[in-house]
Image: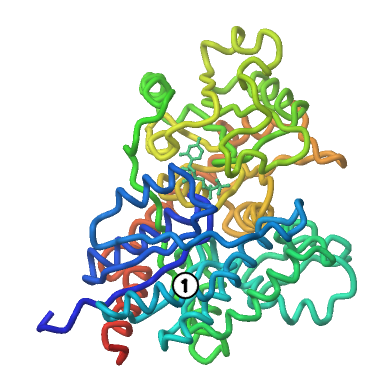
Amino acid sequence: ENGIPRPHIAVMPTPGMGHLIPFAEFAKLLVDRHHFTVTIIGFSEFTNEAQEAFLDGLPYSITSVLLPPVSLSDLPADARLETRISVATARSVPAIRSVLQQIQETRRLVAYIADLFGTDGFDAAKDVGVPQYVFIPTNFLFLTLMLELPALDSVMAGEFRELADPVRLPGFVPIPGPDILDPLQDRRNESYRWVLHNASRYREAEGIMVNTFVEIEPEAAKLLTAEENGWPAVYPVGPLIRGGGAAPHEGAVESLKWLEKQPVESVLFVSFGSGGTLSPEQTTEVALGLEASGQRFLWVVRSPSEKDSSAAYFTGRSGGGDPLSQLPEGFLQRTKEVGMVVPSWAPQIDVLASAATGGFLTHCGWNSTLESVVHGVPMIAWPLFAEQRMNAVSLVEGVKVALRPAASDDGMVDREEIARVVRELMEGEEGREIRRRVKGLKEAAAAALEEKGSSAEAIAELAKKWKSSATA
Ligand code: UDP
């Protein structure tokens, strides 16, 4: 571009493929549509082989560097992920600074983009004179909670889960206290302080990008993107999801072949994300509920875990052993005409894109939610951890594109209730309405990233701002 070097962006996603993918997709749009180059900065101690392979496979305008590991051995063994990420970021500031300085030797660095719990990286960007931004791989609901958190914290006496009234976040249906973000559920835990700390720093950002689109959170979109609302500029840049047909995985071919033979919109896809696990009792109820529903299903079964619903998040492994051997006696035999069960992992995007898929029982991870909406698949909301319970409330009661089964007091959902919601989604009146609405959202999602779409325009605005920035 007329001798002016291509503008360069440094982004720092925090661990997990669910973060890496939307950051990478955002980077690709900046490269393809606006001729930027990008460096992805990662933590070596949190980056596994699959993630390294993913980074290596990105287009050459997107390079990656891993920071030298920092010691977290002084943290208590049970320190939560939010604490680990925040502390690792704070301790990595000098290393981030030297990466940014190195970039500046050869490139025109115009922005530093932190992930949701990585705002201490701002200090490194400030030291080298680069404006700071936040990229939220989830949604406006999460962002609104973060923006409101410092005020909520100063007036709240007890815990969120003890609040008599639901939490009212501007632009959203009321959220029951127990459904608020996991790490905020225990105010004495370090993770609460770290989330609050990050939330307080959002105001320092020049802008906040969010992996969402206007129509899925319309009221909040209006409020957050209004001029002069006292918050940093907010940009909806989604839905950023990974393209389908990616690396074939074990079981992938077989499940897709099976799907091809099923009638249109007849199959319920059941999956709890990259790491979600159920207890042994709950796994049994899901099996018998699916069977009782009489509907076709494709179920990604993971070995049950007694305690931790995110047991497999980093390792991809949960309770251990062959997941299929832990299903109820005779279940596989009895359901073989209507059901397909795959251990641990399915090619989710391809499954959701299949004409045979008519519903998705999901843990409401935001990537899964966007993937479902982009393919027009109505959902059953079965949240497990992180911000998934808030997402479920918004999807069920806000935009109304999902049904939520009722749990008993101990949190279990029994087989009768599972069979009921599955039938309702696949065949019922309410299911039909939900399907109709999600098809509408599908159109809106596609339009958002097309030329002149709301998300495409937001990205173009950012690109323009960054290109004209004085930073040399
Ligand atoms: N995924 C997949 N196959 C599986 C489970 C998950 O391809 O069997 C992908 C899914 O398509 C999504 C991501 O893993 O892109 C899960 O991200 P999400 O935010 O939904 O949940 P998380 O794994 O972070 O809990």
Placement of 194 over or under 280, stated as above or below: below
Choose between 267 and 205: the one closer to the eye: 205
Question: Residue 427: x, y in percent?
Answer: 56, 31
Residue in the image at 59% along x and 27% along y: 301
Say if disc 1 is inside 8 Å of ligand 1.
Answer: no
Q: What quarter of the picture does the C terminus occupy?
A: bottom left
Question: Residue 311: x, y in percent?
Answer: 67, 40
Circle 1: residue type: Ile
Residue on which the image places disc 1 = 96
Q: Which of the colour schemes (rainbow, by chain, secondary structure, one colour) is used?
A: rainbow
**Lateral position of residue 78 relative to residue 99, left or right:** right
Residue in the image at 43% along x and 42% along y: 50
- Tell me the element at label 1: helix
Question: Residue 454: x, y in percent?
Answer: 37, 70
Question: Residue 460: x, y in percent?
Answer: 30, 75
Choose between 167 and 110: the one closer to the eye: 110
**Lateral position of residue 215 relative to residue 471, left or right:** right
